[in-house]
Amino acid sequence: MATPQYKWFFETTTPVEGHMHAIARTIVTRQTKFQLMEIMETLSYGKCLVLDGRIQSSQADEFIYHETLVHPGLLAHPRPQRAMVIGGGEGATVREILRYRTITDCLMVDIDGEVVEECKKHLPEMHQGAFDDRRTRLLHEDARAYLEKTTDRFDLIVVDLVEPLEEGPACLLFTKEFYTLIRDRLTDQGVMTMQAGMTKVNEIFFHGAVNRTLQEVFPVVAPYQSFISCFGTPWGFVLASKGTDPRKQSAAEIDRLIAERLDPKQLGYWDGQAHLHSFNLPKFLRVAIEKNDRVITDKNPLIVT
């Protein structure tokens, strides 16, 4: 029997490591003003959004990434009503926020309108109509400039950005100065969550530096992780707040809050057990975070290679 011949997409995840995905078809390739965008269908994970050669989300397991990114923050706030998403091109982050009955307004600020428009057309499985919800507002501008000029306050701000690649759109959106802006635009009980890079044994410096930088700004900084299959690695996230600590919430409390605030059947990953698992980090990772003393600033940004 002949071996099937596939077209392969090779994703370089570090300077010395990468993953290969067999491609069923390429749906769109587009060089935007800010980055190279591709939407392709892989045989293992279905449709994938790829930016500058790196997979951002896949149809098969994006629910793990987006539930992990969003729900800890909303469940840490006593009554979240106003939310902001920075980035989030495919619309799945907004989708998860809109599941909450208390949410009245969700602002998404993504600088790359071309990516968002292609995702609207080609990734309905991910956004599931979130862009058409009356509570959604969409702006295509620099998120940092928006935060500098706005007087709005938010109960939740989710930072869902690509890594700070050299000359990429997110380079100055992982700095102490940017996190200070976010803190000042949160309500008194407001919470920020963000993706914060890989957490595998040989690639954890960036995650540690993000944590250390946030500690300069927020009194509570809680790192956590989930394994994202299409990335082929555990992935780090951080919750930062002015006082609420998600590590003090029990599994029973998380399950109760989910039942009260949304339909638990809508979630495929996040619940009380997942919450405990994500925030209970292994020893090597806790030690690496504790030892990291790199503070990321506008004058000294950290670039992921």
Image: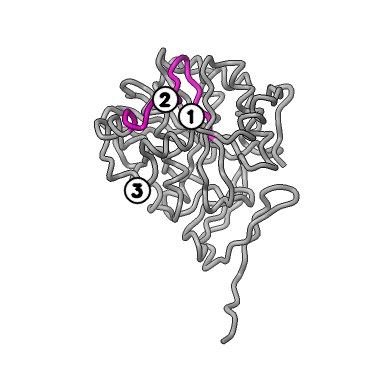
Q: Residue at x 64, y 55 (%)?
A: 11
Q: Residue furthest bottom?
A: 1
| 141 left or right of 129 in image | right
> Is residue 238 located in the magenta-colored stretch of the structure?
yes
Q: Amino acid at mark 1?
A: Thr
Q: Which one is in front in this view, the residue at disc 3 or the one at disc 2?
A: 2
Q: Residue at x 50, y 49 (%)?
A: 57
Q: What is the x, y in percent for residue 107?
A: 40, 30
- Judged from the image, the secondary structure of the residue bearing numbered disc 1 is strand
- Segment colored magenta: 237-254
* The C terminus - image quarter: top right
Disc marking residue 193: 1
Q: Label 2 crowding class (10 Å Cα cut-off): few <14, some 14-19, many 20+?
A: many
* The N terminus - image quarter: bottom right
Q: Earlier in the sequence, mark 3 or mark 2?
A: 3
Disc marking residue 123: none
Q: What is the x, y in percent for residue 56?
A: 54, 47
Question: Disc 3 marks which residue?
Answer: 128
> Is residue 38 located in the magenta-colored stretch of the structure?
no
Q: Which one is in front in this view, the residue at disc 3 or the one at disc 1?
A: 1
Q: Earlier in the sequence, mark 3 or mark 1?
A: 3
Question: Disc 2 marks which residue?
Answer: 156
Foreground residue among 218 and 93: 218
Q: Label 3 crowding class (10 Å Cα cut-off): few <14, some 14-19, many 20+?
A: some
Q: What is the x, y in percent for residue 180?
A: 57, 17
Q: Residue furthest front?
A: 283
The answer to whether residue 256 is visible is: yes
Mark 3 → mark 1, Cα distance in angstroms: 22 Å
Q: Residue at x 53, y 60 (%)?
A: 40
Q: Are marks 2 and 1 in contact (CB under 8 Å)?
A: yes
| 260 left or right of 34 in image | left
